[in-house]
Image: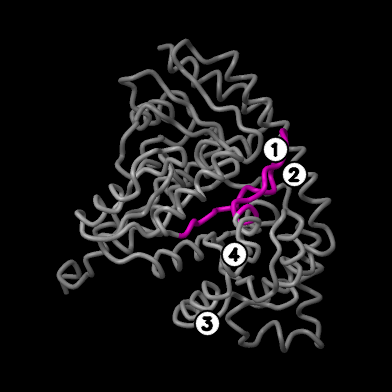
Amino acid sequence: MQWTDVLASRNSRMKASEIRELLKLLDQPDIISFAGGIPDPALFPAQDFAAAFQQAMAPENASVALQYSVSEGYRPLREWLVGQMRAIGVECGVENIFITSGSQQALDYLGKLLLSPGDTALVTWPTYLGALGAFNAYEPRYDRLDPYANTDPAAVRAEAAQAGGAVKFAYLSADFANPTGETLPLDGRLALLDRAEALNIPVIEDGAYQSLRFAGRPIPPILALDIERCGDIEKTRTIYCGSFSKTLAPGLRVGWVCAATEVVGRLVLMKQAADLHSPTLSQMATDTVARRVFDDHVARIRQVYDHRRRRMLAALEREMPSGVTFTRPEGGMFIWLTLPEGMDGAELLARAVSGHRVAFVPGGAFFADGSNPNTIRLSYSCASDEQIDEGIARIGRLLRG
């Protein structure tokens, strides 16, 4: 059987994630890795989950935990999330919350819901690699999302039409974005809503890192600003994607969407066609742990990650040669480096791993067009003080050489 003869055309747009491949380096004990943007497993609330899963499997609960369930998600967890969304300024009801198997599934569903082949997706430049992977299956064209752009909306629509489709949505992570660590300020969020209204498109707000603010003043989510304008979530154009992966544990695969009920209803149909519902057992355990320890646990991981962020920024100040610039995030897990013109992050990685036993992610993978190869992403979430100091020193020596 020649499988290439029968594959759908979308397969040409799908390829292995560079970050997923780089995570294999974590199995090599002599590698100092700043590659994976993953939470520190030492910080998982493991004992709390052990108790929560035991509770879910108690005789009075097991018939619910192990049975088929509704596609919208476990109602008590959705009710808890209503309170969490309200705490960040988003007034909504349980009917506006939809549980997914991680926010990555939400991005896949939204790509399937909104994109036809040849349509244009507006994304940040660079943008989250997982979002590009999710959207690629639906064969879009990408254009740069700039909230401050003064380009005539009619010209943007005309260019999309010439490419064979329409402008369908704007996607971004507004807080401590992966990969740059940067946050879109309030005026940028308002400008983005203006631009989305002019183009008559939805905004997909990826809130994966929203809870991980270490410094500065919180900024309302784009969905909260949208509700403030419209007066009601049912009139909004913003779709908020949240996740427990960076706060509790990624292995749970529990995320959520908060949006108008029309959007939620259509996503429910996607869910019914794909996997019926997210695992009830994980949802029940997540609900129990979230109610018991969420605020205290998030406060703890913020303290740890903030220390590592400051340690890495200090090491970069000390070790980076002239011509290297880097972001100074107020939260999240990432710092973005721009290298002198002519350098290639992928080539640098090969030399860093083979000769210096240190790893990071080349930045070109985060650009829809593969541009800007002279960039790299560093993550401090799983590195000790000693690893940060030594690893950044090694990268500095490599760059100077």
Along the horizontal axis of the image, is 42 left or right of 184?
Answer: right
- Residue topped by disc 4: 253
Q: CA distance from mark 4 to mark 1?
A: 22 Å
Question: Tag 1's secondary structure?
Answer: helix
The structure residue drawn at horizontal position 59% and vertical position 64%, both measured from the top left corner, is 253
In this image, 383 relative to 345: left or right? right
Q: Which residue is mark 2?
A: 301
Q: Mark 1 = which residue? A: 305
The amino acid on which the numbered mark 3 sits, given as a three-letter code, is Leu
Q: Main secondary structure of the magenta part?
A: loop
Estimate the x, y position of residue 217 in percent, counting from the top left: 73, 37
C-alpha span from label 3 to label 2? 33 Å
Which tag, 4 or 2, sits closer to the chain's start?
A: 4
**Secondary-structure class at tag 4:** loop
Q: Is the residue 361 above or below the residue 239 in the image?
A: above
Within 10 Å of the Cα at label 1, are there few (<14), some (14-19), or many (20+) other Cα atoms?
Answer: many
Q: Position of residue 362 (x, y in %)?
A: 40, 35
Figure check: 380 above or below 50: above
Whether label 2 touches label 1, CB < 8 Å: yes
CB atoms of marks 3 and 1 within 8 Å: no
Quarter that holds the N terminus: bottom left
Q: Is residue 260 magenta?
A: no
Task: Give the color scheme: rainbow, by chain, secondary structure or one colour.
Answer: one colour
* Amino acid type for the residue under numbered disc 4: Arg
Query: Looking at the image, which residue is at 44% across and 31% down?
Result: 376
Q: Residues within 10 Å of mark 2 (few under 14, many from 20)?
A: many
